[in-house]
Image (tube, rainbow, N blue to C red):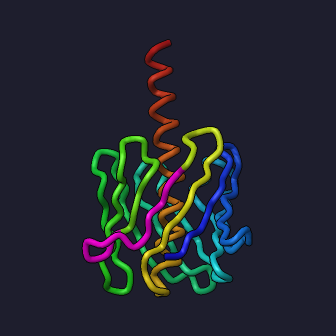
Amino acid sequence: MEKLFWTKGIFKNQLQITRNNEIIGSIEWKNMFSSQALATLKGRRFILNRDFFLSKLEIADANNQAPLGQIMINLFNPKSDLIINGKRFELEIKNFWQSRWAWKFNGQEVIIFQSNELLSKDKGQIEIYSGDTEELEVLVLLGLFVRNQLILFMLLILFIILVIAI
């Protein structure tokens, strides 16, 4: 098992991925609500994109703009599918607070994400249980991009509740 760590302040526009206290990747948004981000992981560059109201998240190779994957996130369904290189991966949100989520392949968890703090400062860990495949980089980045989408959903719901209460 490989263990990575990630940190992102809630009002920051950059998420960092580390292994053994060494930065090995990042995701950088133009601002907190930006729908596009540039990412790097282990020297490889990616473009991440999401629809504003729809929950469609996409990832592409930054060098040739080739699409690598696309997933639809639904707050009311804790599972979503992603196909990469003909392989079907399943994203599963593991709890109501959306602090644990995982990618599965053939029913087995291959990557588990955990957020240690809710809204003050995002940080957590990534446990990788699979061998080194080219899909792992895409899954790690999309998994972290999903986390940002879930936080935006939670903030939107909080805003709606506040507006209704006032």
- Residue 143 position within the rendered picture, expressed as x and y whole percent measured from the top left: 48, 63
Q: Does the magenta run of residues contain 144?
A: no
Residue located 33% across and 51% down the image: 74
Q: Main secondary structure of the magenta part?
A: strand
Q: Does the magenta run of residues contain 112?
A: yes
- Residue 5 position within the rendered picture, expressed as x and y whole percent measured from the top left: 61, 63
Q: Residue 82: name its quadrant.
A: bottom left
Residue located 68% across and 43% down the image: 11
Residue located 46% across and 27% down the image: 160
* Depth check, front residue: 129 or 66: 129
* Residue numbers of the magenta segment: 104-115
Image position of 128 with respect to 164: above or below: below
Label tally: 0
Q: Residue 7: name its quadrant.
A: bottom right
* Depth check, front residue: 98 or 31: 98
Determine the residue located farthest toward the top in the rendered image.
166
Image position of 119 with respect to 46: above or below: above
Specify whether 150 is left or right of 47: left
Residue located 46% across and 42% down the image: 153
- Residue 2 position within the rendered picture, expressed as x and y whole percent measured from the top left: 53, 75
- Residue 142 position within the rendered picture, expressed as x and y whole percent measured from the top left: 49, 66
Image position of 113 with respect to 133: above or below: above
